[in-house]
Amino acid sequence: MPGLEPIAAVGTPFGKGALCVVRLSGEGVLEIIERVFEAKSGKLRDRVATYGILRDPVTGETIDDGILTFYKGPRSYTGEDSAEFTGHGGIVVTHAALKAFLDAGARMAKPGEFSQRAFLAGKLSLLRAEGIVDLIDAKTDAAARLARRAADGSLERKLESIAQTLTALCAELCVLIDYPDQSLSDLDEGALRARMNDCAEQLDRLLSTFSASRAVTEGVKTYLVGRPNVGKSSLFNALLGEERAIVTEIPGTTRDLLEYPLCAGRLLLRLTDTAGLRRGADKVEQIGIDRVRDALTGEEGGIVLALFDASLPAQAEDLELIAFLQNLRDHKTVIPVLTKTDLPERFDETLLAGFTKPERMSLLERPDFSELFARLERAYIEDENALLRGEVLMNLRQYDCVRRAKAAMDESKLHFTEAENDVCVTLLEEAIGELREADGREVGEAVAQEIFKRFCVGK
């Protein structure tokens, strides 16, 4: 990709460390290198690590010694002439190394500009680029594995396969436009319809993966609710494996929403301890209770672990909570939890008949949460194989593209008649365009720039 000005950036975090890496890319990179780098172990060659001295291009003073690797375009990450200098880590020496390349003619790279150039050069699809930034941002092992599969092109290949099938369908249907004496029966109408239905079903399955990928990567809001002293804060601490919430026998200890991340199997839970729901709370505690109710009713999705003391008969606050939770079942995963099961049980479990089977636990010792985590995984991960293959939608942009493609597919099937064949083809082409936008082939410049802003400088 000739003509793009040379850029430079530090590819490692600033700070004290063993190594720093400065990256360069663009037209004239080799000339910049010759102004600042003196090879000591042979002539600089393409894709060969060369030891040498890095000097200030203005004063000639030695800045550092290290390894420089030159990559001749288009056989580089960006498709341009590129280079990486690896020197000693440290704030001062790293800054001086970067400044040397800037003084020699490069400009400072913008966030994600290296990857954006790779995308513009056709070396990297938008889906793979998003997989890379998700890999960098991954908060759990499961999220990293999912992002790695996206970076390797799993979703890209899936969408391309569907797009190719739709393209072939369009080509066959265009026969009817070019040769009016042909009919659908000549093209095997049943087989064509079956292929259209199969593509629509594949898009449906992809759309259903969105909630699972979000649960793995971004996390699921998970609320611990119940009246005071049922064990919310104790369960909160037990799940986290450390003392994060204050636990006392005094009602109303927790007065606000207390949130921490929790890796629960493959899911990331944004675990939230809440104020106890009760009558007669003081002004400050009531504010916390109101926030709990607002959070539960104002958000779509999420998990509610509703705690009830198994050692006592249901209290008025328990009955009010059960009635309140009935209205949340359509848009939240509600799981009752019976606590203090080490004591004789007096709670009437039939009161929870409208919900899923309660979890039972005593928090005197650290419980085994594996079954609870597995239960939550089953609630969010519908297509296990798709997750393993990495054929999942990772963000709202991808979801929206596939949603629009599915809508065009559904409408095209309504026009799958000889009289409206041209309309059917137009809608199939619209679906193909949406899939192309998902992988970046037809994406707008503004959208691409917004995506690459998520990258750090130097990536």
Image (tube, rainbow, N blue to C red):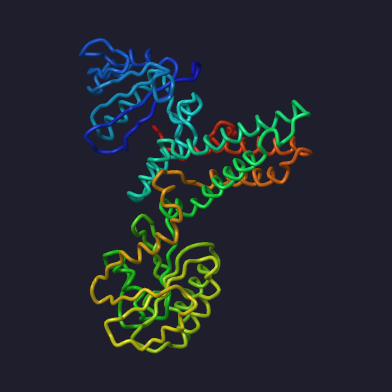
Compared across the picture, whether 147 is left or right of 90 comes to right
Q: Quadrant of residue 448?
A: top right
Q: Is residue 402 above or below residue 8?
A: below
Q: Which of 399 and 236 is in front in this view?
A: 399
Residue at 25%, 14% (x, y): give it: 39
Q: Nearer the viewer, residue 398 or 99?
A: 398
The spot of residue 364 in percent (x, y) is 24, 77
Compared across the picture, whether 276 is left or right of 400 comes to left
The spot of residue 149 in percent (x, y) is 39, 40
Please state, as top left, top right, bottom left or bottom right, where the C terminus lies in the image: top left
Residue at 78%, 29% (x, y): give it: 180
Residue at 76%, 38% (x, y): give it: 418
The spot of residue 367 in percent (x, y) is 27, 70
Q: Is residue 188 above or below residue 299?
A: above
The spot of residue 277 in percent (x, y) is 45, 79
Q: Quadrant of residue 147?
A: top left
